[in-house]
Image: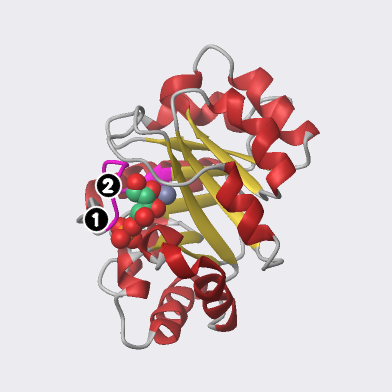
Amino acid sequence: AAAAKIAPSMLSSDFANLAAEAERMVRFGAEWLHMDIMDGHFVPNLTIGAPVIESLRKHTKAYLDCHLMVTNPLDYVDPLAKAGASGFTFHIEVAKEYWQELIRSIKSKGMRPGVALKPTTPVEEVFSLVEAEDPVELVLVMTVEPGFGGQKFMPEMMEKVRALRNKYPALDIEVDGGLGPSTIDAAASAGANCIVAGSSIFGATEPAEVINILRKSVEG
Ligand code: DX5
Ligand code: ZN
């Protein structure tokens, strides 16, 4: 079975103290740091890009799980690789014409390729990317509309997670949006093993406890 990865979404952290926030999450046991890269076009919000990843990389060895909510992911491969990104997860909705080229380029730059799908995108659209000669190694099932933290978890997305887990026992399946102690069991029992959580971790008085609750649910 795929190992649990708890990935605090740094979007909910204090951006003015990003290095300290990252250090604290690693100390609390987070395996990954989830970095939400938005371009103000694919989604109606603007966050961080390669320069911030580069700055953060100087302060941490942690796995930087980059989620690209951008219209032109190809343009981000080189800059993010140079900045020290670990995972590069693009959205299928913008990459239907060139995902093969994109995956090859992500891998050739030493990053781990993943594909994300919005709530309205059918899960079947990513099957060929998992089965390709150069496959994605992670599928991110959005459980809210991408763009903002603090939204409500969409339980109906668990059907997609179950379909993926049935087909691909070893695949990294990530869920993102509205995850926390009250929604984790639905996601974990559907088969998700990579858990992004922003507001539930950063909004907690004891973030370490929330991270532990999430991991215990995935590990069963
Ligand atoms: C939303 C982002 C998420 C977001 C999750 O577009 O992809 O990573 O930060 O935040 P919460 O956990 O608060 O829903
Ligand atoms: Zn995200």
Residue 71: which quarter of the image? top left
Q: Is residue 13 above or below residue 103?
A: below
Name the image quarter holding the N terminus: bottom right
How far is disc 2 from disc 1 in space, using C-alphas?
6 Å
The one of 132 and 163 positioned closer to us in this rendering: 132
Q: Position of residue 104 (x, y in %)?
A: 73, 26
Is 80 located above or below residue 64 in the figure?
A: above
Residue in the foreground of this view, choosing between 116 and 219: 116
Can residue 169 be seen from the camera position used here?
Answer: no
Farthest left residue in view: 152
Q: Residue at x 60, y 25 (%)?
A: 75
Q: Position of residue 80 (x, y in %)?
A: 65, 40
Label 2, secondary structure: give it: loop
The amino acid type found where label 1 is placed reads: Phe
User: Ligand 1 within 8 A of label 2's CB?
Assistant: yes
| Mark 1 Cα-neighbour bin, 10 Å: few <14, some 14–19, many ≥20 | many
Q: Is residue 7 above or below residue 173?
A: below
Q: How is the image coloured?
A: secondary structure
Label 2 crowd (10 A; few <14 / some 14-19 / many >=20): many
Left or right: 68 in relation to 187: right
In the image, the segment drawn in magenta is 141-149
Residue under numbered circle 2 = 144
Residue 199 is drawn in which quadrant? bottom left
Asked if ligand 1 lies within 8 A of label 1, the reply is: yes
Marks 2 and 1 in Cβ contact (< 8 Å): yes
The answer to whether residue 12 is above or below residue 27 is: above
Q: Is residue 61 magenta?
A: no
The residue beneath circle 1 is 153
